[in-house]
Amino acid sequence: MSLPNHLNETFSPEEIQFLVENEPIRIFPRITTRQMVRANRQYDEFDSNTAKQDMKWKLITMDDTSLNNMVAMKSTQVTLWVALILKQQAKCSIIAPAWLTVKELDRKIQYEQTHLDRFSEMPWNWLVLAQLLFNKAADDFHDPVHELRSRVQDLREIRQSKVLKGLQYLNESHLQLDNLSVLEINELRPFIIGVMDKLRDMHAAAHSGSANEDQDIDNYGDDRYVEAGV
């Protein structure tokens, strides 16, 4: 089954979110899944209630290296989708990325305003990750979420303005825009592809017209050469 044109040219929001949710993030688990090993052999035989307390939790997963080795309030790394599920069940706190603070976002905004010809370095998933954490883990931030939202929006608008100015350098084969996130590129992709296709057609037509003119000149010279009887 063929996809609609807009899905052939870009990722859907759901596809981008799927990619982002498979990235790692650090959490503080509120549960212990690591099996406790008793050092003293005299406790090898204990009742089932004690066994259940030691076992704590067992999470079903293909990769149990981190999930079934968690200790409560000891930071560990899991994929984002797992962290969001645990957060929803009140089984963890999510550690916000270092760049997602008021101080760091202010620094990024200042950089964007000072360097008009380049973009600040941000993670490829910064916009989507920020929105996911704002919506599902707002209580895990040290800074007020409304201030973080405001700065993320300011940063996005500044970068969008710079992208539009950068489009004047677009040609039929190349556009240099470093440090854009996947969502920013995804929003631009249909427009840029369309413009580059038009420029490529115009470039090819111009070269074709120039080649035809050169051929006509050569033919005209050959005709005069013949008429002169040379």
Image: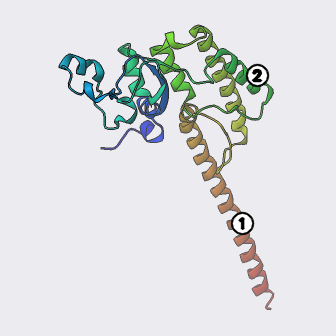
Q: Secondary structure at mark 2?
A: helix
Tell me, yes or no, if residue 56 can be seen here: no
Q: Mark 2 or 1, which is nearer the eye?
A: 2
In this view, which residue lies farthest toward the left?
Answer: 48
> Is any atom of residue 206 visible in this view?
yes
Please, what is the three-letter code of the amino acid marked with disc 1?
Answer: Glu
147 above or below 111? above
Q: Nearer the viewer, residue 3 or 127?
A: 127
Local packing at callout 2 (Cα closer than 10 Å; few below 14, some 14-19, many 20+) is few
Residue beneath the point at 49% across and 28% down: 25
Question: How far apart are the alpha carbons under marks 2 and 1?
Answer: 53 Å
Residue holding disc 1: 213
Residue 70 location in percent, x, y? 40, 26
Measured along the vertical axis of the image, is residue 171 above or below residue 204? above
Residue 167 position, x and y percent, is 69, 37
State which quadrant residue 144 falls in. top right
Image quadrant holding the C terminus, namely bottom right
Q: Could you tell whether 101 is left or right of 67 in the image?
A: right
Label located before the other in sequence (2 or 1): 2
Horizontal side, residue 186 vs residue 221: left or right: left
On screen, residue 16 above or below 50: below
* Residue at screen point 39% across, 38% down: 4
Task: Name the residue rendered at 37%, 21% in the picture.
Answer: 32
Residue 157: where, in percent of width, then height?
A: 65, 21
Label 1 CA crowd tier, 10 Å (few <14, some 14–19, many 20+):
few
Q: Identify the residue position indicated by label 2 in the image.
A: 110
Query: Which numbered circle lies on residue 66?
Result: none
- The single residue placed furthest to the front in the displayed view is 42
Q: Amino acid at mark 2?
A: Gln
Q: Residue pushed farthest bottom?
A: 230
Q: Are marks 2 and 1 in contact (CB under 8 Å)?
A: no
